[in-house]
Image: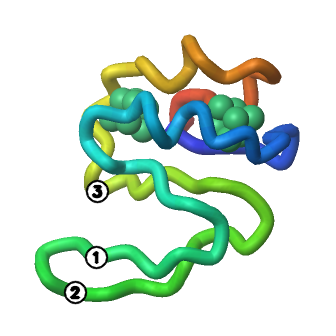
């Protein structure tokens, strides 16, 4: 999944994600013990390696900013 610039940073999706795949804007994240820089400074972002495409996040987003990867 990916989060577009339509996102209003309400954080609802972060709480909803069962995999911890959605990180806050500007947060470093960790995959397999390696740390990476934030993918967005402006709004929450999805870490593809942690996302299992359950789509729970899309149901809570008020502005439909979360869409499947092409
Ligand atoms: S699709 Fe599921 S696992 Fe992926 S970011 Fe959304 S809630 Fe998290
Ligand atoms: S639920 Fe939607 S608007 Fe809210 S932080 Fe997530 S992507 Fe952004």
Q: Which mark is residue 30?
A: 1
Label 3 C-beta lies within 8 Å of the nearest ligand 1 atom: no
At 57% across and 61% down in the image, what residue appears?
A: 24
Q: Which mark is residue 12?
A: none
Q: Residue 6 in the image: x percent, y percent?
A: 86, 39
Which residue has dot 3 on it? 49
Q: Which mark is residue 34?
A: 2
> How far is disc 3 from disc 2 in space, using C-alphas?
12 Å
Q: Quadrant of the C terminus?
A: top right
Task: Using residue 47 as the reference point, say whether residue 49 is left or right of it.
Answer: left
Q: Residue 33 in the image: x percent, y percent?
A: 14, 83
At 81% across and 23% down in the image, what residue appears?
A: 63
- Secondary structure category for the residue under label 1: strand
> How far is disc 3 from disc 1 in space, using C-alphas?
10 Å
Q: Earlier in the sequence, mark 3 or mark 1?
A: 1
At 53% across and 29% down in the image, what residue appears?
A: 68
């Amino acid at each position: 999944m990916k989060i577009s610039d339509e996102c209003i940073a309400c954080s609802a999706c972060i709480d909803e994600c069962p995999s911890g795949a959605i990180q806050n804007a500007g947060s470093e994240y960790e995959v397999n013990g390696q740390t990476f820089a934030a993918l967005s400074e402006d709004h929450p972002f999805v870490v593809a390696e942690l996302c299992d495409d359950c789509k729970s996040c899309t149901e809570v987003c008020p502005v439909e900013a979360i869409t499947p990867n092409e």
